[in-house]
Amino acid sequence: MVELQPFAGSTLDAFNTYHGEGPTYDPATDTAWWFSIGNRELHELNLSTGRKTKHDLPFMASVLAKIDGERQIIASEHGLHVRTIATGALELVTPIENGVEHMRSNDGRCHPSGALWFGTMTKSGGEHRKGAGTIYHVLHGKVTPIFPSISIPNGICFSPDGATAYYVDTMENLYMKVSVDPATGLPTGKPEIFHDGRGEDGGIDGSVCAADGTIWNARWGVGEVHHYDLAGNIVARYKLPPKQATCPAFIGRNADRLLVTTAGEDLTHEDLKADPQAGYIYELGVPVKGVFDAAYKI
């Protein structure tokens, strides 16, 4: 087992987010974005000024990508919405599982081609969650279900050349990789195991792929961030204060810092006494060489 490194980072936002998810960063404005899924909120933090803004949403949402300087795309429980940045106005442009009240979106990310991958899952837990979700590919509004029977979709990220995609069903804890078409982001091969996390502590959650193709992953339930090499081996482990780490994102003008969201979901009052920083947003405090998320091609 790789030695666990103590937390050496800093708090970016001291707010007990119910379920922090979907962080991303816009280098043009030096702004980090993330969601609190259960609270139906989009959070915005300008890193240059420290100004924090919370935007209420009329739905559960979990993935955001830039379209251009004026618009963003949001994946929600109803499908894909265009958000006008200046006003916050929302328009449902690509319905996906719209009206299926027990389902919501979860992890996702834009492929270098401009295609969006995101997954769906049930809103409540239990055995009925098993296999209920799907990972979708969306490009220019065309929706393609690519991986059905997913319980908790997570870990979605892409190699910088766009030739490999990664995803995981956290309920299974088998981190998968699959060859994809760099021009479209559609799978061209069969998935194979990248990392077998069965029997390991914690669940494999959200991920980002660095400039060298290695992967940074948040490990749910143990409060850690893991760094995987190209062969899927864990080469470094870093501690976070809360137990429920959810997803990382590269931030900073040079993509050389790592933001990590966490969650306070399902924690009782007594749990929060023992884990008072659950839901805080952190900078990990280790050097990284990241790449920025691609814009969505609407």
Image: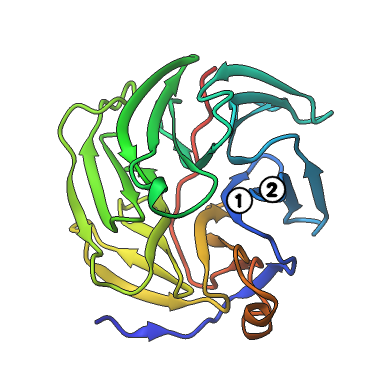
Dots 2, 1 in contact, CB < 8 A = yes
- Labels in figure, total: 2
**Residue pointed to by mark 1:** 253
| Residue 97 rendering spot, x and y as whole percentages | 51, 25
Work out whether 129 lies above or below 118: below
Which quadrant of the structure image shows residue 76? top right
157 vs 21, left or right, is: left
Q: Secondary structure at mark 2?
A: loop
Which disc, if any, is residue 30?
A: 2
The residue nearer to you, when weighing 173 against 69, is 173
Tell me which amino acid carries mark 1.
Arg
| Residue 205 rendering spot, x and y as whole percentages | 42, 57
Work out whether 222 lies above or below 215: below
| Residue 102 rendering spot, x and y as whole percentages | 54, 37
Does residue 153 appear in the picture of this structure?
no
The residue nearer to you, when weighing 82 against 200, is 200
